[in-house]
Image: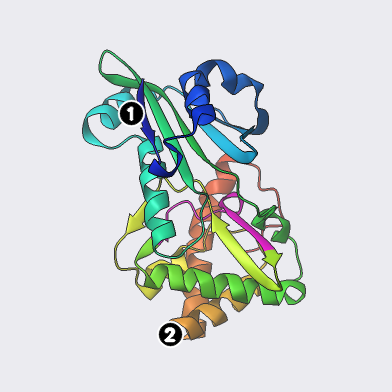
């Protein structure tokens, strides 16, 4: 099995033992999230909370792609976490990546990160009154604008991938599931479209558009138009295949 360990943790005997036995120990962890292919479980190693993501075997086409042409998702999650954190933004600390191959092709992999201390997610704002959460929305939007100005864009910027909490009187935000990222100049138009997957009512996006426009010296009405257009496109397509779990108004 291929193993990459954050140099900060290379001398941890307990972590090394866990890595060497990850396939056997993984089922004993506390279930965090169960997907159709990927599973997240939490563990405590030497008093530190950690989350392990198991990437199941990709389909035949993706096995070839991730083995020969593109970096596997777990490798990207590990490497991108360093880039995001080094730029001053919050995402769980990358700890290790393990990968098993069969006949030269990726079969399954594990990514270990620190456990994010923030417990709240943006799902809770699906049907919220925007006026009640305006301070959170504006703080979140300013931070997102800074992220975009730094040339970074999360390509799965959805409610479950944004964690937050109030720490010492200030709202703090972290992003997770960052194997799909873009590192290049982010235009205002592209930045506005990045809000499309979020849950919320129209007034919520009015506030986001207003704050994003202020942060990036743009026109608030135009930002709202772009966000609304992107949301209509995304959610119209999404609703045809999945149940929408909040009151959808486009």
Horizontal and vertical percent position of residue 162: 58, 56
Horizontal and vertical percent position of residue 99: 38, 25
Horizontal and vertical percent position of residue 78: 40, 42
The answer to whether any part of residue 183 appears in the image is yes
Give the numbered dot on residue 62. Answer: 1
Closest to the observer: 226 or 211? 211
Is disc 1 placed on a helix, strand or loop? helix
Horizontal and vertical percent position of residue 77: 41, 43
Residue under circle 2? 218
Task: Classify residue 42 by image quadrant.
Answer: top right
Between marks 1 and 2, how big is the CA–CA gap? Answer: 40 Å
**Which segment is the magenta one?**
153-165
Residue that appears at 39% across and 52% down: 82
Closest to the observer: 17 or 30? 17
Q: Where is 71 relative to 26, above or below?
A: below
Is disc 2 placed on a helix, strand or loop? loop
Closest to the observer: 174 or 188? 174
């Amino acid at each position: 099995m291929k193993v990459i360990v954050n140099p900060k943790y290379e001398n941890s005997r307990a972590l090394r033992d866990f890595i060497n036995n990850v396939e056997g120990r993984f089922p004993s962890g506390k279930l965090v999230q169960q997907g159709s292919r990927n599973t997240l479980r939490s563990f405590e190693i030497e008093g530190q909370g950690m989350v392990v993501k198991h990437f199941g075997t990709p389909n035949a086409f993706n096995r070839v792609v991730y083995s020969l042409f593109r970096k596997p998702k777990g490798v990207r999650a590990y490497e991108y976490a360093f880039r995001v954190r080094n730029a001053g933004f919050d995402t769980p600390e990358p700890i290790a990546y393990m990968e098993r191959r069969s006949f030269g092709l990726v079969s399954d992999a594990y990514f270990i990160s620190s456990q994010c201390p923030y417990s709240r997610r943006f799902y809770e704002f699906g049907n919220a009154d925007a006026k009640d959460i305006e301070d959170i929305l504006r703080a979140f939007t300013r931070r997102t604008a800074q992220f975009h100005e730094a040339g970074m864009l999360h390509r799965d910027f959805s409610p479950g991938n944004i964690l937050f909490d109030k720490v010492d009187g200030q709202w703090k935000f972290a992003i997770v599931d960052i194997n799909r990222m873009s590192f290049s100049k982010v235009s205002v138009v592209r930045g506005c479209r990045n809000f499309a997957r979020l849950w919320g009512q129209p007034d919520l996006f009015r506030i986001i558009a207003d704050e994003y426009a202020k942060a990036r010296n743009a026109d608030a009405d135009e930002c709202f138009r772009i966000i609304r257009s992107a949301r209509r496109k995304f959610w119209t397509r999404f609703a045809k295949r999945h149940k929408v779990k909040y009151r959808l108004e486009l």
